[in-house]
Amino acid sequence: MYEYIKGRLDELSPACAVVEAAGIGYAVNISLNTFSQIEHQTEVKLFLHYVVREDAQILFGFSTKTERELFRMLISVSGVGGNTARMILSTYSPHELQNIISSGNAVLLKNVKGLGIKTAQKIIVELSGKTLALEGDTAAAAGAGSTAVYDEASAALAMLGFKKTESEKVLREIVASQPSASVEDVIRMALKRL
């Protein structure tokens, strides 16, 4: 029903953004990935998924169409609701999630809070091959070079003894805010934040 919302970012938290469009403030549930993409912006455009339940009408917003399509694929799996899908997309970037599904790594996927091994396996079985059909949007294409930087920096921090979950969160923020930074610069910035 709704394709996207474009307007002034009125309020922002890691789980929700309030976007004012045509004088109305829309509360939009977002992932941490989307939060990191829009946190320093005043005007935003979020691609929407609209859920109507018996007790609520909920908007989920995403910074890219790829992330929204992954969300829709996730909620098509039996047992995965909107909040679980959002938690998965908060834990892993769209690129990371596509790699996890294509490699069949259910153990890594079950690291998401509230997700068991059976549901993780079900997601992989049902979505295997489907995520490869997703075409990268302009943001993903622009971030293709930064993916290699991210991977190298992540490996370097792991060798230095930092926990993967903590270092990856910091690296995602750094690469999103400075996509042209070199591996060395990204590692230096990450070390200051860890």
Image: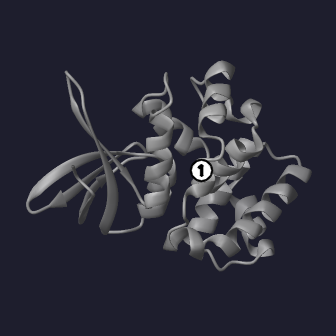
Decide if residue 93 is in sight here.
Answer: no
Q: Quadrant of residue 4?
A: bottom left
Above or below for 35 versus 22: above
Residue 148: image location, x then y, percent: 76, 68
Q: Quadrant of residue 150?
A: bottom right
Residue 151: image location, x then y, percent: 78, 61
Query: Which amino acid is tagged 1?
Result: Thr
Residue at 55% from the left image edge and 66% from the top image edge? 136
Residue at 51% from the left image edge and 71% from the top image edge? 139
Q: Badge 1: few (under 14), some or many (20 or more) residues near its Cα, within 10 Å? A: some
Q: Residue furthest left?
A: 23
User: Residue 47 vs residue 177: left or right?
Assistant: left
User: Residue 64 vs residue 5: left or right?
Assistant: right
Q: Residue furthest right?
A: 159
Q: Nearer the viewer, residue 10 or 27?
A: 27
User: Residue 77 vs residue 96: left or right?
Assistant: left
Residue at 59% from the left image edge and 60% from the top image edge? 173
Q: Nearer the viewer, residue 115 or 125?
A: 125
Above or below for 180 versus 80: below
Above or below for 93 versus 54: below
Q: Which residue is mark 1?
A: 131
Helix, strand or loop for disc 1? helix
Q: How many marks?
A: 1
User: Residue 21 vs residue 106: left or right?
Assistant: left
